[in-house]
Amino acid sequence: MIRGNLDGLHLGDLLHWLELGGQTGRLTLADEIGERRLDFLHGRIVYVSSTVPEERLATWLARDGLLPATSVRRLLASAMLRQELFTDALLAERAITETALGASLTVLAELMVGRILDSSELRFELDPGHVIREPSGLYLSLTPSRLLLDSARRMDESKGSRTTSPSPALPLDEDAVESFFWQLVQQGIPSDDPVDGDQLNALHDIIRNVMASLAQWLASSTGLVPQPADHGEVMAAALQTTGNVRLFGLPQSTWNLMVLACSIRSPELSPPMGLTAVDDFAASLDLWPELTDAKKWQRGPAGTLDRLTRRVAIVWSRGAAAAAEVLGVDPGVAQLAAHLITVPTDLVLWVLAALPVPHQGIRRTLLTELPRRIGAGLGHLADFPQDLCLVLQGDVPTKLGTCLHVSRSLIPSAAVWPMTVPNDEAVLEFATPEQLQKAATAARQAVEGRFP
């Protein structure tokens, strides 16, 4: 593994070295916008991909009208659930010709590299051990030399069109894990109760293992998360009895369906903003075998945690929906947000069940900080609507976040679950104390008596 920093000028030197040396591996280039990946096979670029939503192949195909946006989303959803290459799915379905697909990928690569060349500083990582295979039936006549020339030309033609919004990154790479660990130490270990060197080394190893376990699930996907096995069973039973599936009480499945729904950007496709809208999207996918039997996305048994997370999602949804009616927010959106906000904490608790952290202060700080960072990174990676991303980040007050905050005290073990606003006082930006009291009463009444 080779990693470091470089600028746009020296990127050309790196690409020429990979070409002339006939190198094979994955080159990842990261700036403040996101990551772009170039797959090299014997010095030739055979595939490109990006975490920037408007630079993804599915969005590109829909934008250029090469395929209907609904067809692109269905094929991409199927490929994601099966963990297959999207290009293989496109060609297997004969949705597009090899020539047209290769040409579209080439133009997309030029756009990506053109934006990279305009970056003031890049972080790069070359992984020669990454398994590279050329997508079947697809040949890119794409050498680094030609790519650099065409990218520079395209950049000159489109000055001022560069994406500028920064992206929260998943804190799972080696440098981020190190930085995060020392923040945990600073915040979680009081100065009057220090740990010795051996204890610190042991904690360091545990945190690295925790982050590695999360990375194993999350780093290779586009925001999908592992879900309890019974989610598929519940959906399959509902299909057999009523022909419809309600996602209420299934937070991980709700999250994954939102990821599939937001997988491409197109003016023809609006992201679902409400739990019922996600239900309707799931029905439109026509992918029930993949959704109900997605064994690749099932996690090991965690009965107590699974029951707790499901109960939290239900209670929080009911409370938040009632508060939303008082505060002028769509109750369906509040229900959806309540389901999504439980997922990052559930992920961390699931890993900690197998890799417990013995130091109470470090564990408490980890549960406070890590779900918020993972939620922000995954939400951006999945391209969730901004209102939902802000709730997952929790550092910007919003009216939607206020609805969830008002009802947060009603959920089991409330202190474990994340804040959706920066602090208690932030909600006063959106409602008077009297309105907040009325919303809290409505939330309590919606939950009271339903759960002992």
Image: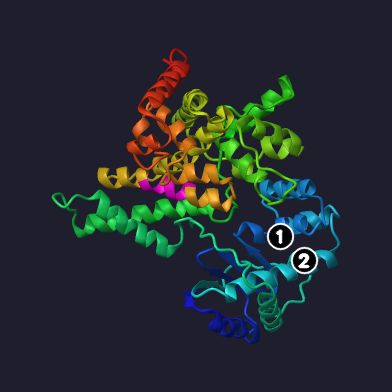
Amino acid, disc 2: Ser
Q: Residue 322: where, in percent of width, then height?
A: 50, 22
Image height of 209 relative to 346, above or below = below
For label 2, the crowd category at 10 Å Cα-Cα, with few meaning under 14, some 14 to 19 and many 20 or more, is some
Image height of 218 relative to 133, above or below = above
Label 2 SS: helix
| Residue at screen point 41% across, 15% down | 452
Q: How is the image coloured?
A: rainbow
Q: Name the residue that disc number 2 marks.
A: 104
Image height of 9 relative to 124, above or below = below
Q: What is the count of numbered marks?
A: 2
In the image, the segment drawn in magenta is 369-375
Q: Which disc, if any, is residue 164?
A: none
Q: Name the residue that disc number 1 marks.
A: 57
Image height of 360 relative to 402, above or below = below
**Residue 73 among those drawn in magenta:** no
Q: Residue 281: where, in percent of width, then height?
A: 70, 36
